[in-house]
Image (cartoon, grey):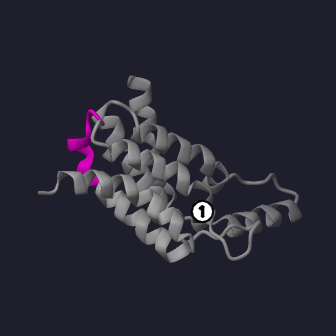
Amino acid sequence: MDAQLFSGCSVCIIFEPLKSQPAHFEAVLAAQKKALAAQKGQSAPTFLVDSLPSVVALASKASSAPMAALQIAGLEGVHDILERFAEAADPQLEGHYLLELYVAQMSAALRRCIARESPVANRVCHVSYVVLAEMILWIAKHVQDVAGLRQLLRPFLDANLERSP
């Protein structure tokens, strides 16, 4: 479990030293820098955006772990991913965003965190709701999929409507 906790916490840590280097968070800019390096005969640099599937998977897995500290680290990772990659365009699909590929994965992790049967739901509630709110705003702004937004919110609304007097 210590290795999982370390992995979950490292998701949050990796963003900080790279924040002043936009190519790590923008696939189009990263591709341009790689092409420039190839023209100069240099080896292609690597960017965090190239590992986005692994970073999202790690944060999502950590946020659904049975340990509160690991869940919080994972949720903070999801928060950082949303914050850093929110405006990153998908270079393969014009008019789309990279995070569109990961909405289902990140929302599934959030659903597990806010589920009533979650053993650590009370301790991660605040972080979950902050990340959930950010995801809702991102989806509303970037994805024209209202059904997807409803699907994300349905478990939360159902659980809270059952609890209300």
Left or right of 17 on screen, residue 29: right
User: Residue 116 location in percent, x, y?
Assistant: 27, 41
Residue at the location (68% across, 64% down)?
27
Q: Which residue is mark 1?
A: 100
Left or right of 96 on screen, residue 59: left
Q: On screen, 155 above or below 19?
A: above
Q: On screen, 73 above or below 17?
A: above
User: Residue 44 location in percent, x, y?
Assistant: 78, 54
Q: Main secondary structure of the magenta part?
A: helix
Comparing 14 with 57, the one in front is: 57
Which image quadrant is residue 132 in? bottom left
Mark yes or no: residue 86 visible: no
- Quadrant of the snapshot with the N terminus: top left
Q: On screen, 67 above or below 127?
A: above
Comparing 161 with 74, the one in front is: 161
Residue 22: in magenta span: no
Q: On screen, 50 above or below 37?
A: above
Q: Residue furthest left?
A: 165
So how many labels did they put on this image? 1
Specify start and end residues of the magenta stretch as a single range. Answer: 118-127
Name the amino acid type tagged 1: Glu
Mark yes or no: residue 19 visible: yes
Which image quadrant is residue 40 in? bottom right
Comparing 143 with 5, the one in front is: 143
User: Residue 153 location in percent, x, y?
Assistant: 39, 60
At numbered mark 1, what does the secondary structure look like: helix, strand or loop? helix
